[in-house]
Image (cartoon, grey):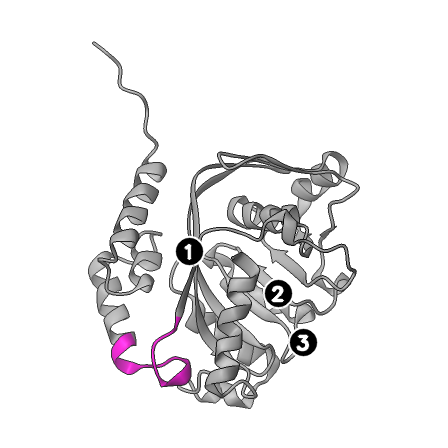
Amino acid sequence: MEQRPKVFPQQVLIRLVVAIQLCDLLLHPWIMVCAFQNRCSIPHCVARCTQRLNNKRHVRGGSSKWFLSTALKSSSDSTQSEDRPTVAIIGTGAVGGYYGARLWESGAYNVKFQLRGENYEVSKKEGFTVTSIDGDINIPPEELDAFIDSKEVGPVDWVIVALKSSSLEAIPALVYPLLEPKRTRILAIMNGMIEDDLIHLLREFAGDEEGTNEMSGQINCCAAVYAGMALICANRLGPGKVDHSFAGLLKGGLAASHPSFSSDEEMDKHQQAFYDLWA
């Protein structure tokens, strides 16, 4: 019998999700984030997302505004200035490692990677490598800005959180040293619908009295929090090594912002900031 080529379930799933997304057949992006990443059953997910839309719990009195991006800044847009925006990657696994490496490749950002254990030791000695259908990336050890403890880094412009949702409660302590109100934006690219929980934990960790108002859509410890959705097939092959085999589309929605950003003009700045990061 003729043997059929192996098709990995993850690749099939990603292709299905991309097809559905491009056809715009889903009620809301949250459904895709939740149902296709093993957080909830599809019926529960649809019910929860529908309730969110009806409750209009997010900024500007309505549901989150989602921004779509398909590519990163090209290296031609890069600058050698020391004033480049600083991006901290919390969770340098397959997803965080891929998007962080692409940002580093653009030359437009100072990218700092949070690494732990063997991943840190090997990467510091041998560098960080991404093999990709869109072109390989190799960050030499002398150019890899890696850290273990976020207290070593201080405030940054962007924090990209790419941890598993099982690490949700640990995130506030990890990211808080990186935050500066009105400056730092947080993009969470995690499995499941976690942005409400993350916002609540950040408010609680900061002792934010505004956190008692779950309907406010405001957060005081940073400029903004975005819920991210990555349509990507990537795997960590080993310490300091990631393989990207399919897709890479990224979508983000503004989930909360600092009270000083209340006008439509200020909200548009958050949208533009996301586009500037990924477009």
Read off the residue under disc 3: 180
Earlier along the polypeptide chain: callout 3 or callout 1?
Answer: 3
Is residue 180 toward the left or the right of residue 26 in the image?
A: right
Where's residue 265, x and y in %? 50, 83
Q: CA distance from mark 3 to mark 2?
A: 10 Å
Q: Are the two marked residues, 3 and 1, in contact with CB atoms closer than 8 angstroms? A: no
Read off the residue under disc 2: 158
Q: Which residues are magenta?
A: 53-65
Which amino acid does the dot numbered 2 rest on?
A: Trp
Residue 128 magenta: no
Earlier along the polypeptide chain: callout 2 or callout 1?
Answer: 2
Q: CA distance from mark 3 to mark 1?
A: 26 Å
Q: Are the two marked residues, 3 and 2, in contact with CB atoms closer than 8 angstroms? A: no
Report crowding for label 3: few under 14, some 14 to 19, many 20 or more residues within 10 A (C-alpha): some
Earlier along the polypeptide chain: callout 3 or callout 2?
Answer: 2
Where's residue 131, x and y in %? 56, 33
Name the residue rendered at 54%, 80% in the picture. Answer: 203
Splitting the image into 4 quarters, where does residue 25 fall? Answer: bottom left
Say whether residue 239 is visible. no
Q: Are the two marked residues, 2 and 1, in contact with CB atoms closer than 8 angstroms? A: no
Where's residue 279, x and y in %? 51, 57
Above or below, 108 against 269 in this view is above
What element does badge 3 sit on? Answer: loop
Q: CA distance from mark 2 to mark 1?
A: 20 Å
Which amino acid does the dot numbered 3 rest on?
A: Glu
What element does badge 1 sit on? Answer: loop
